[in-house]
Amino acid sequence: MAFRNRSFTDIHSLTREEIEFILDKTAIIKAALLKKDRSIYRLADGMDLMAASLFYENSTRTRSSFEIAAKKLGVEVTGFSGIEGTSVKKGESLQHTLDMFRAYLCDAVIMRHPLDGAARFAADYLDIPIFNGGDGKNEHPTQTLLDLFTIREHLGRLDGIDIGMGGDLKYGRTVHSLAIALSKFSNVRLHFFSHPLLKMPQGVLDFLQQNNVDYVEHDSLYGTLGASDIFYQTRVQRERMPDDEEYQKAKDACRITAAHLSAAKETFGLMHPLPINKEYPEVTPDADASPKTIYRQQAGNGLPLRLVLLALSFGLMGTEFRGKSNGVEQRSPSFYTDLLVVKKEQKTEQNLKPIQGSGTVIDHLVPGTARKLMDLLKVEERCDIYRGGTVRRRSNRDELKAMLMIENRRLTDDELRMVAAISPKSRINTITNGEVSRKIELHMPDIIEGIPYLMCTNTGCITRPEHHEHVTAKFIRAGESLLRCYYCNAMMGARELF
């Protein structure tokens, strides 16, 4: 079954077929809720199911709609809203909080957390479904699904549409997830407008380019609205900004008035994930009264959508789904290529004396990495006999490379994987009786983990040591020298890490 015990932590993992199936089910459940036809949606009666609602951050719509959806379905809800009065205030880690609700035999966890990647960590840690109600500035997949449902409900389609996005494109997790989700549909054009300080992150733009999604960054709000069938306005998130000066500069840059809406298409719809800031409203009161605003319907759609997701994960519906589903991503364990060994005496690299007996020569290292490798391989701690340095390449005397030679030592596969992560394209020469007995060239591994000093470059990631969550960093190869954080999806170059 594609959905039973399924966690909903990100929008990446859902196929177009799965999304459309979820939206079709949502339409059925919405109609049943409006008619109060309990036979359609009251699916968990007598099953003794309990969901833990763990909201570390403030929420009205996500928390309430999930809890109401659970109760309509027949699922009990426990947990907390805000960390006041919880052991989190005493310094308890996310892992230990999850331990407790697992011990209390909860059947699912609905969670909002301030750290990017917290939901992915929870889904890996527990063996019950996790529903991501927003993790930091990373993703908000259930919001995205209700947004897609609202767009389809208003326009009648998800292909061949122009969607504008404005306000806080930098910190707004809803627009990040929505942009990714819309890439799964055909002939979608995205239009962005924001203060220069709050532009859409480059990582999202790179993703759109890689997936051949057309987008335009506008310098006029009127122009953006005029090009859009739907405009997705967002609140400037003061609470996520590093300093208040950034907020003061950006708060008025994308304010929608009645005049803006009157100039938009007749079929235009204004969406917003809510709330709207009452002090500095990004949708002014005169615009709020316009029939072109559809964010009240949008928020209401959270109830049937989240009821459907709960029912799917509990195996209460969706058994008939036969569409395409993303399975577990298969990664190649191979990270090196064997090279031909030509039997000859080792060449001397300037003043580096060759190994006469047995050992390992790590050659073609990126300059500056040898010291890191020595620490990770515990060369000095083990009292290995070693020598190393930076030398000129024989093939190009203007280029430098580093070398590390360790006598009487063979590297394990885990140690080789570490070298490959730090310096891909380096070469390992295994020395036996003074001659090279094996030569391999290393490649960037598909998965990089277990290297002690590595940190995600995103300071909001759950793996960062300053957050004291004790989650080990893990990275997925996204290109020859490009990595993606497994937890928070942040993209970074390998050299940023090493």
Image (cartoon, grey):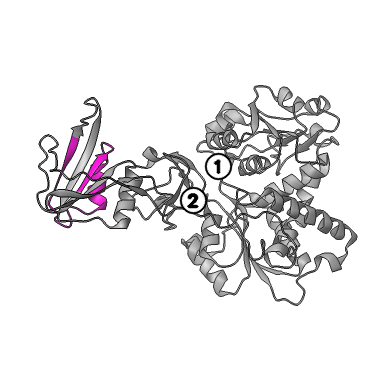
Q: Which residue is mark 1?
A: 240
Q: Residues within 10 Å of mark 1 (few under 14, many from 20)?
A: some
* Residue 296 visible: no
Residue drawn at x 76%, y 33% is: 284
The verdict on residue 208 being magenta is no
Please name the amino acid that badge 1 sits on.
Arg
- Give the answer, above or below, for where 493 lies relative to 407: above
Left/right of residue 160 with respect to residue 167 in the rendered view: right
Left/right of residue 470 with respect to residue 284 in the rendered view: left
Query: Percent from the top left, x then y, of residue 32?
Result: 86, 60
The verdict on residue 366 being magenta is yes
Which numbered disc, 1 or 2, marks the residue closer to the eye?
Answer: 2
Q: Quadrant of the N terminus?
A: bottom right
Residue drawn at x 15%, y 43% is: 344
Query: Percent from the top left, x then y, of residue 90?
Result: 47, 62
Q: Which residue is mark 2?
A: 486
Query: Percent from the top left, x then y, of residue 154?
Result: 82, 41
Numbered range of the magenta stretch:
361-390
